[in-house]
Image: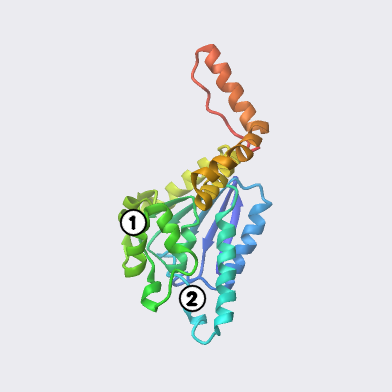
Amino acid sequence: MHHLTFDIANDVATITLKHPPQNRIDDQMVDELDEALDAIATSGARAVLLQADGDNFSFGGDIQLWPDAPANELRDRFERYMNVFNRFERLPMPVVAAVQGLCFGGGFELVLRADVIFAGDGATFGHPEQTLGIVTLLGGIYRVAERAGRARASEWAMTSKPISASEMKQGGVVNRVIADGDLAREARAFVEDLARGPTRAYAAHKALLRVWAVGGISAADEAMFDIAMPLFATSDVQAGIKSAVEAFKAGKPRPVLHFSGQ
């Protein structure tokens, strides 16, 4: 049985964790995520929705694999997971995560790779790693720090306390908290709207944020025009600028554009 599935329809790629009862992340799930990313990269999809089956998003890594494994084998495993998660993070299109129930450990670290996070009002997040005497192995603590600041990231990781969706939103980690019963519908509608947008511009913004995360504002300024100027050759930008100028000259509101993603 698959531990993760994906499908592509109406320019949206949907990735679904399917490893009951806790959607634990294991070698098979990571391999299937890697395969999904291969398919998405060549599919023409313009936005991605990450979701999970069941009452809970994920309890984290499948630690049953760890006790008897030598350190070098564990390192190889975790490096593999990190590389695939980072590949997911670098998709050149918007990625939205819809989170319900418990979202802990590696599951939380996967969600942190999304550009936008929607959470059900009953969702709970956490870093349980400290209760095992280890760290957030897939980059969770500093990705939380990037969104919520060092103080919150330190407290949440060092205490391993469960954090509500509302507190995550207050901290800037979660974008929206939605009634549990409406989560799937609202996340789907949001990602479908993104899929009709200027895909190349979304990719450029993601690239700029990556440069900023690594090198700060000065590095992003240096990279700005190498990333931004190729957009002006795209059909979306040419149509957008032309329509804006025509509307201005006619004294009319700018029309809503139907972007092609090209």
- Residue matched to label 2: 62
Mark 1 vs mark 2: which is more N-terminal? 2
Query: Can you give x and y, in whole percent of width and height, for residue 173 in the image?
Result: 39, 53
Q: Which mark is residue 184?
A: none
Q: Residue furthest top?
A: 250
Identify the amino acid type marked 2: Asp
Quarter residue 88 falls in: bottom right
Helix, strand or loop at label 1? It is: helix
Location of the N terminus (image quadrant): bottom right
At horizontal 50% and vertical 15% (from top left) the residue drawn is: 252
- Residue matched to label 1: 165
Query: Can you give x and y, in whole percent of width and height, for residue 83 in the image?
Result: 59, 64
Whether residue 258 can be seen here: yes
At horizontal 53% and vertical 53% (from top left) the residue drawn is: 214
Q: Is residue 167 left or right of residue 15?
A: left
Cα distance in 3D space between marks 1 and 2: 24 Å
Query: Can you give x and y, in whole percent of width and height, for residue 255 in the image?
Result: 53, 24
Q: How are the residues colored? A: rainbow
Which of the pair 185/118 is nearer the observer? 118
Identify the amino acid type marked 1: Ala
Quarter residue 249 falls in: top right
Q: Is residue 225 left or right of residue 65?
A: right
Helix, strand or loop at label 2? It is: loop
Location of the C terminus (image quadrant): top right
